[in-house]
Image (tube, helix red, strand yellow):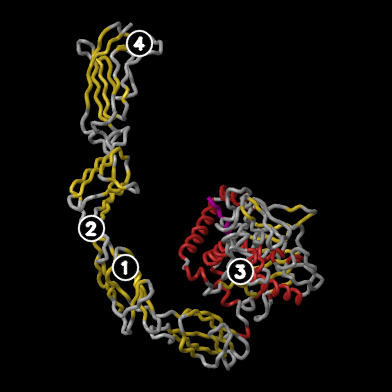
Amino acid sequence: MKFFLATIPCFFWLTLFAQSDGDFERCNTFEIHQEKMATDPEYANSYAEKMQKIELWKKNRSAEAKADCDEILFIPVAVHFQDVGIDYACAVEMAVDQVASMNEDYAGTNEDFEKFENAQPQMWGNIQSPGSCIQFCLATLDHPAESGLPEGDYAVTLNQYSSDLDEVAAWAGYLNFYVRELSGVLGYSPLGGNGDGDGVVCGISSFSSVNCGGNNLQGNYNLGRTISHEVGHYLSLSHPFDSGNCTADGDGIDDTPLTDEATYGCYAEDEEIIHCDEPKLWPSYMDYVDDACMYMFTAGQVENMEAYVNTSLENLLNSATIKCEDAACVGFDVSFSSQDETCDGNDGSITFNASGGQEPYAYSVSNGLQFSENNSFQSLAEDKYYLLVMDDAGCEFVDSVVIDREIPPMELVRKQSSFCGDNSGWLEVAVNHPDEFEYSISGAAPWQDTTYFGNLVAGTYTVVARNAANCTNQIEVTIEDDSDLRLSKRVVKPVNCPLLDNGLIELEVGNGEEPVRWRFNDGPLLSDAYFDRLSPGTYNVSVEDARGCRSEFEFDIRVSYTNVGEDCPCEVYIPNAITPDEDGLNDIFKTVPSCPVTDFELVIANRWGEVVFETNNVEEGWNGGVDGYYVGPDVFFYRVMYRWGEERNESLERETRTGTITILR
């Protein structure tokens, strides 16, 4: 069973430790998480609720949404430098660079991503690494009044805020980066952030890829990947090695290979490290390798982060619309409408409505590859179009839209089954559309202008319709195979022996042409249909005659002890003498049934008819005594009554056995 590490209300911090004399510290997030789950019911309940939200979101996510980013998840970022000895211009330069490189990492457009692609599929099999729909913007608007930042300036502060375990409430609605000097660690983050003023902490020597203002980046951590790693934690991802063993997936992600230890250093792109019996995915942003060897997320990691943003960080998404815009572009507004392509073909359209900003506007439906001053695009075929509108000041509107094509309604009018394997089946379809269509089976030649298809044997057929503009639809039609074979004899007997499978199926057909052959389940062909010694279960029997007529039947063999079968090997052993001398041999008079019994009664009486012993417990026996005293040698009478079977499944008839028992002393 997988476990997931999620948002922790009272921050637990997940730390990525730097190298010290060749040794690395280890994270103990998994142990802390387990302890918190066991000791804090409020946390455990919150954790369970968030995991349920993530799983429900992933389950309900559409296939189209998984395949493409129709909607970018923008997260506003603020960067706070504290006591790092750089000036404000350097701070802004580092912040801009960090956000830009992080966007490439999360979108999968980083230049070194090709190393992962070059190593596939030899290295990591079917592991996919799609770009995520998550992007980050260094906020420029709606800053907290206390920050003193003018509208339009980047959300970068210097020597104003330093957060560790506590949130900075004024900066709620932002993903905050707190940058300062750190010793022995590169950075750390809450495992699942809240967007309420919390954020990730990063050492100045591993933040961004910029050296300025006297700051010197560490040589192994100079590409800004520490933030890519820590933001992964903020968006719910844990290390792949947190379980500490090779039998449990510590990060809760299906497609990350098992590992029980971190990976350090750097490797050639095709260097394979076998660990836990599978290649270790060392380039993952969530491992501990150097920045130069850290360049991908798996599809599972991407999906989990997107699920977390959509279910637990809605406040950041809502803030993005008022914090991420360029101040100079406030008021520039664009909307559009689209019309799908009809069956006539190439008549889809997209029309823009732009206002505000600086005219003239330039419009594109090809992601900026070609612009037009005309706001209306006609004669479009079905496709996905990437929309870009720019005003004269360079303000941009970016979106996408899918132009679908009309699907002509198509239905099955009627059909007829084939008979006994022949080709007498047929079908007829209809397309409810004014255009003229032609039709084909499976879209292959020949095409015909009629909707009727004859001479069909039993099977499933895909009927395709198209017009001259190649507007298509299709439906599947199953032609059954009728048969006149009918059962004239049908015996289905349940298992009615407690210790023996004695179910029975016996069948005969009253028509059909000889020879008639039977098949039981997937067994060989047989000349008759008598199947005995069957255990409880479902069985399939098919029959076929010389004409090729075929029928199938399904039968359920159940268990019933209402009438115990005469062929049942069930007996009740009753001794006729005992020697109660406490030598451990034949001391007790006791009945021993070979099958389960209910409604049991044993009565023992003396020769005068006086009851000396009775019980309803089949496990209880008589030791040859009366009222605490052992009797002398004598003859006694017994009566045993019982029903075969277990409770609620016992026989209707209650059997009675009588006889004598001799006491020998």
Residue ID for mark 2 = 483
Residue type at the position of mark 1: Val
Name the mark nearer the viewer: 1 or 2. Answer: 2
- Residue 100 image offset from top left, x and y in percent: 67, 74
Secondary element under disc 4, as helix, strand or loop, is loop
Q: CA distance from mark 4 to mark 2?
A: 72 Å
Report how far apart the C-alphas of labels 4 and 3 lie in the structure: 88 Å
517 lies above or below 217: above
Q: Nearer the viewer, residue 272 or 548?
A: 548
Q: CA distance from mark 1 to mark 3?
A: 58 Å
Classify mark 3: residues with Cα within 10 Å, few (<14), some (14-19) or many (20+).
Answer: some
What residue did someone put label 1 on?
Answer: 477
Q: Which residue is mark 4?
A: 580
State how far apart marks 2 and 3 are (Cα): 73 Å
Bounds of the magenta span?
Answer: 1-8
Residue that appears at 61% across and 48% down: 246
Q: Is residue 199 visible?
A: no
Q: Amino acid at mark 2?
A: Ser
Q: Cα distance, mark 4 to mark 1?
A: 80 Å
Location of residue 436 in the rendering, given as x and y in whole percent from the top left corner? 32, 84
**Mark closer to the chain start, 1 or 2:** 1
Identified at 21% across, 10% down, the residue is 607
The quadrant in which residue 175 appears is: bottom right
Residue position marked by numbered label 3 in the rendering: 172
